[in-house]
Each structure stands twice: as C-alpha cells, then as structure tokens.
Amino acid sequence: MLLYKQKKNQSAKGNRLLISINVLGSAGPIRFVVGEEELVAAVIDTALKSYAREGRLPVLGSDLNDFLLYCPTSGSDALSPWDMIGSPGARNFLLCKKPKTDVVADDRRSPDAGIARKGNGSWKSWINKSFSLKVSSH
C-alpha cells in the first residue's frame, strides 16, 4: 500500500501564498504568508499589524475599515473585504487609505463658512493687510 504525502505548500486550509503588499507612501512592500482562503479583511488587518510592528512610516492606524486593498491585475476596483485573497490569482497588492468623504454642509448652517469665504480674498486685500502691519523701529 502506497501512502500519499501531502505537499509542504498545502495544508488543511488549502494552498498558502507569499503575498507582497505595497503601502501607498511607504518605502517598501510588506511580505507574509497567508492561506488562499483568507478573507481580504483579515489580510488587511495582518498587514496593518505587521506595518506597525516594523515601525514603518507614515503611521497608518489600526482600523481595517479605513483601508482598501487593490490588485493590479483586477482593474481599478478595490477588492471586497469578503473576497478570498486567492480569488484574483495575484500575489502583489496595493494598500491605500480610503478617501475621506466630507459632507457638504449648507453655507448658512456652517459656522466656518464665513471664515473660509473670507480667506479666499483677492490679492488686493492681501497687499492692504500686509501694509497695515506696524513696523517697529529700533
């Protein structure tokens, strides 16, 4: 009777992959091994923890909901957090912070609306403001 030995790169969870994640603004990629059935959300969490453990800059934070993982071969859409990391068939990824969505407030309700509008004056107001500064003599 011949026994079949399981390959080293296969486990009970399936194949394991060495992935490389480039973080936007960081010097180099983060590399680690994951199972191909791992969820994208878990991979983002692992990448953030590894990034922080290595003391890399810029500091990113630890909330995985603030980040998107892109695969260069799958187009411009980010991977869903519920997808498996092995589904795109790639091993190189890009981790980016989600763009902040600012809620546009009505100008009458926003207390900072007047300040923002005031700062967008013309060059004449800047010149007048500059000349109105008092110069102290020695």
Image (cartoon, helix red, strand yellow):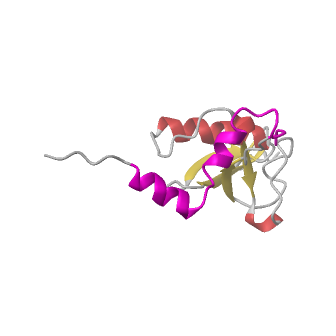
- Report the front residue among 87 and 25: 25
Residue 15 lies, in percent from the top left, at 76, 49
User: Relative to 118, is 131 above or below?
Assistant: below
- Report the front residue among 114 and 61: 114
Q: Is residue 134 left or right of residue 117?
A: left
Residue 89 falls in image quadrant: bottom right
Q: Residue furthest left?
A: 138
User: Relative to 136, is 49 above or below?
Assistant: above
Q: Which quadrant of the rendered structure holds the N terminus?
A: top right
User: Relative to 8, is 77 above or below?
Assistant: below
Residue 131 covered by magenta stretch:
yes
User: Relative to 25, is 64 above or below?
Assistant: above
- Residue at the (60%, 49%) spot, across then down: 119
Q: Is residue 46 left or right of residue 77?
A: left
Residue 69 lies, in percent from the top left, at 73, 51
Q: Is residue 123 left or right of residue 93?
A: left
Read off the magenta span. Answer: 103-132
- Residue at the (47%, 60%) spot, across then down: 127
Residue 122 lies, in percent from the top left, at 59, 61
* Image label count: 0
User: Visible in this render: residue 138?
Assistant: yes
- Residue at the (63%, 47%) spot, across then down: 118
Residue 92 covered by magenta stretch:
no
User: Visible in this render: residue 28?
Assistant: no
- Report the front residue among 131 and 5: 131
- Residue at the (37%, 48%) spot, across then down: 133
